[in-house]
Amino acid sequence: MTPPATPSPTPRPGLRRWWAAAWPGLVLAAALSAPWLSSPMFLDDWHVLFQADQAPLTAEGLAQGFTFLDRSSIETWNLPAHPAYHFFRPLVVASYKLDLALWGTAPLPSHLLNLLLHLTSVALVALLALRLGGGRRVARIAAVLFAIQPQVCVAIVWTSGRTETLAGLWMLAGFTAYVIARQDRRPWWLAGTLAALGLAMLTKENAVLLPAMVGAFELSRWIAGGWPSRQQVARAAAHAAPVIVAGTAYLGWRLLAWDPGAELGLPYYHAPLEAGFAVHALAKTAYNLVALVTTAMLVPLFGVELLVE
């Protein structure tokens, strides 16, 4: 009896196909961000730069760089004395210290760096869409939707948006490495996933979503291929376990390190039972809807042919 043929690895999208899928999103992201590149620093920008500048260039100093608000912010926003953040973002603090060393408080280089990080993430979204079998049309749509999502302008115009652009890049890079490891049967790519997860943990607490993305990917493979065999389950567990264990350990540590008595005052914290919560929630919802409508309307300017084969 002839043994069953071993399925061949999923072919890698070539650079030309990748570029064909990614360039509409890259063009839109750059076009939408261009008007904001000349924006000055804003309140949060001065605050995070001040905190980073004051933080010692040590592991402890970087880890505690965003632990407390400075006195000027407390007086300006009428916040409680020394309210504690719950942030652990040493890599972001280090990036701001590098900004100050290279170009001081000039806003344009910081905006350009945030834009570069976002453009790299757009390209990774296109690559992931191709890798996951969506085809060039789906990859283009995915890249465009990611490029024009409402929070882009916030991440670009605010120097403090570095947290979002940098964390998003690490998470997308880590997930891309995991997909390559599984599809091409190259387990050494898992080292890239774990490295990206570690960098994401040092950037923003949203890093806990990367293990969830890995779990969702494995589940989608089982749904698409039918009920998995024991060997398939064991292979998936062997690949996903290091990522899930690392993410769970990080989440447990963050929960243990959380200080429930250190609540932020307005405008950073609104409890659901507070009188101003409804207004705050409606304002945030309106902001996101307006941002989505005003950015999505620009897509037809580039022609719908960008989104088709």
Image (spheres, rainbow, N blue to C red):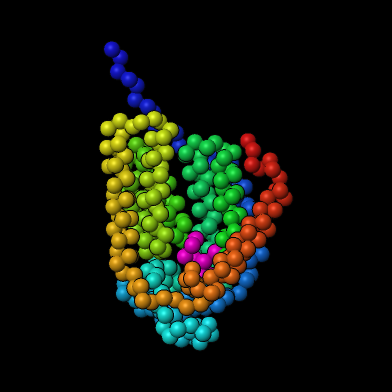
Give the quarter of the figure containing the C terminus.
top right
The mark total stands at 0
Q: Is residue 52 left or right of residue 187?
A: right
Identity of the residue drawn at 55% across and 64% down: 155
Query: Looking at the picture, how far across and down is residue 123, in whole percent?
Result: 52, 49
Q: Is residue 101 left or right of residue 37?
A: left
Identity of the residue drawn at 34% across and 73% down: 259
Which residue is situated farthest in the top direction here? Answer: 1
Query: What span is in magenta?
Result: 155-165
Query: Looking at the picture, how far across and down is residue 165, in whole percent?
Result: 49, 61
Identity of the residue drawn at 67% across and 56% down: 293
Vertical placement of 6 versus 155: above or below?
above
Type of secondary structure dominating the magenta stretch: helix
> Which residue is more in the foreground, 112 or 207?
207
Q: Does the magenta segment cover residue 257?
A: no
Identity of the residue drawn at 41% across and 42% down: 217
Can the viewer see residue 100 in this picture?
no
Q: Does the magenta segment cover residue 159?
A: yes
> Which residue is more in the foreground, 272 or 5?
272
Query: Looking at the picture, how far across and down is residue 179, in whole percent?
Result: 40, 42
> Which residue is more in the foreground, 127 or 208?
208
> Which residue is more in the foreground, 291 or 189?
291
Vertical placement of 198 versus 59: above or below?
above
Residue 136 quadrant: top right
Can the viewer see residue 93 in this picture?
yes
Query: Looking at the picture, how far across and down is residue 274, in whole percent?
Result: 50, 73
Residue 229 quadrant: top left
